[in-house]
Image (cartoon, rainbow, N blue to C red):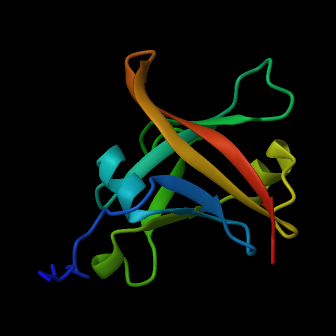
Amino acid sequence: MKLKTLNPNIRGGGEPYITIQKNGSFYITAACAQKMGLKKENWFQVAVEETDDHSSKLYLIESDKNDPMAISTFSGRNSKESGSYKFSSKPILRQLGVDYKDKSIRYVYVKEFKHQGKRAFEFEKRVEERD
């Protein structure tokens, strides 16, 4: 039998998604950060479709630090090794109306597109009961 040793140091593996942690932080996985091409300083507007009452999709629209509607992502703990990012915004969570304390909420990466000339990213919501 021939065995292949797997490399535990490969970055960006796994499913690209954003999850909402119990503390209200948005956690961007390394695979998602890689797909989005995140760098040290990233600014985004967070949006939903006006006609989507259940916020089944989430959009991040690239912006800059001078935009009062933008939030900044920052590198998560041990991000140098993991390649992950986070951002916090309880007002956004309230507007989304998500029960992040009792439910596991994940926004799965769907695609990159242009919105008004800026890079934007679409995510689809997945909800499960927390253990």
> Splitting the image into 4 quarters, where does residue 124 fall?
top right
Q: Residue furthest front?
A: 1
Q: Is residue 123 above or below residue 52?
A: below
Residue that sits furthest to the left in the current view:
2
x 75%, y 74%: residue: 22
* Residue 95: % across, % down: 83, 43
- Which residue occupies 77% across, 35% down? 55
Nearer-the-camera pick, 98 or 94: 98
Q: Report whether residue 120 is seen.
A: no
Residue 72 at x, y percent in the picture = 49, 55
Residue 123 visible to an observer of this rendering: yes
Rendered position, 117 above or below 72: above
Q: In the shown orientation, is residue 110 left or right of residue 69?
A: left
Residue 70, quarter of the rendered image: top right
Left or right for 2, reference 42: left
Q: Residue 50 in the image: x percent, y percent?
A: 76, 20
Q: Is residue 88 left or right of residue 5?
A: right
**Vertical placement of residue 108 versus 53, above or below:** below
Q: If the image is split into quadrants, where does the C terminus sit?
A: bottom right
| Nearer the observer, 119 or 63 | 119
Picture quadrant of residue 34: bottom left
Which of the pair 72/19 is nearer the observer?
A: 19
